[in-house]
Image: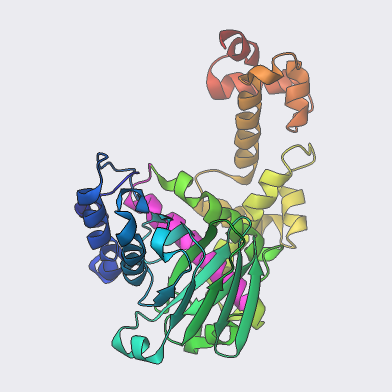
Amino acid sequence: MVVFRAKRLLLFSANSSALHHCWMPILEDTAERSSKPAGSTGPVVTVDTDSIPVPDRFGWWKDMAGQAIMPVSLRSPYASDFKGRAETVQLPHSPSGTFTYSPMSAWRSPVQIRRQDPEDYFLVLVGGGSSIRLEQGRGIACLEAGEMALFSTSHPLAVEFVDKGRPCQSTQFRLPRTVLPLAGGRADGLLAEPLSTRSGSGALLVPYLKGLADAVRDCGPAELARIGAIGVDLAASLLAAHLGDEDGLPVETRQAALLARINAFIDHNLPDPELRPAAVAAHHHISVRTLHQLFRSEPESVSATIRRRRLEHCRADLTDPGLRRLPIGEIAARWGFRHPADFSRTFRHAYGVPPSEIRVNR
């Protein structure tokens, strides 16, 4: 178990201090009880019930959930032998957490809302093999693994984590009302409604959330803020699409979501030798000029991005022992390089050695 001491959480502005204080009492308590040494992995915080005495585990989990998410009532048939693990990513304004736990049910009452309401939305993504029944407002969402829905801290809520004889898992992405660019609480119309995760921003948001912890472990505050903003933009785009109001989003949000879709398209089509700026622009129904304007804020041009990602894949294949017998020319071709001589020259320029030397040295 890895525990992050309280002072390491104070990375961001006072405006988001409440979000980053939410884990501090739980982490300190867990560190004191654990027989394992505390450590840090940057903005990623992991706690679990293994270091908690068995009779205290469910009560500990209740406290943790109340502080990390919102005050709720919990009930579990496994309360006497409860097991849980939480891995959170402390992004400014929009932290994310992946929770694995014994099956249980949760509800939030009007009394709890009156006592404390952080006025946040949460996107919940169901993890592998789990099922969740979510009720809020007029909505009822029965979600299976890979599916997503929205809930709010400001309305009564009932959640059933279905007992399938194995631990449940969900990822929750916090979206404060003050951060989400949807005016007038319009997102309330989507509470407990299944949201698309197979196309558009939803298809990008799922891998974003799943890979977030690994992606940010070594990031500094500025990069964390940028990565967090991408998540918020994707979430806003997803919700706006379901509301039929994508044009109502700020220009910056729409551009960020479009850029994320373009980057995903590039990654998916790297093997295609015809992948060029014109093809990327045509697929997204924009002009090549608009595409280049979008990339002005990026570290590289469109062409340089495509070339670098292809080279990275080639380098990975060349150092893979399982592909040692695959000719270099075939490796180049499988990642979109048509001519071996051009590939060799480009590879040498990027890495300082020819591709054959990379393979030999391995």
Residue found at x 32% / y 52%: 221
Front residue of 336 and 276? 336
Q: Answer above or below: position of 61 versus 362.
A: below
Q: Is residue 220 left or right of residue 236?
A: left
Q: Position of residue 157 (x, y in %)?
A: 49, 83
Which color scheme did the rendering employ for the protein? rainbow
The answer to whether residue 207 is seen in the rendering is: yes
Q: Is residue 193 magenta?
A: no
Q: Position of residue 156 (x, y in %)?
A: 46, 87
Q: Is residue 311 left or right of residue 56?
A: right
Residue found at x 70% / y 23%: 343
Residue 289: image quadrant is bottom right
The answer to whether residue 48 is seen in the rendering is: no
Q: How many marks overall?
A: 0
Q: Answer above or below: position of 317 versus 228.
A: above
Front residue of 131 and 246? 131
Quadrant (top left, top right, bottom left, bottom right) of the N terminus:
top left
What range of the chain is rendered magenta? 218-240
Q: Answer above or below: position of 198 versus 334.
A: below
Q: Position of residue 280 (x, y in %)?
A: 72, 51
Residue 225: image quadrant is bottom left
Q: Is residue 228 magenta?
A: yes
Q: Position of residue 357 (x, y in %)?
A: 60, 10
Quadrant (top left, top right, bottom left, bottom right) of the C terminus:
top right
Q: Is residue 270 left or right of residue 208?
A: right
Please identify the dominant SS of the magenta region. Answer: helix
Front residue of 120 and 31? 31
Residue found at x 54% / y 60%: 168
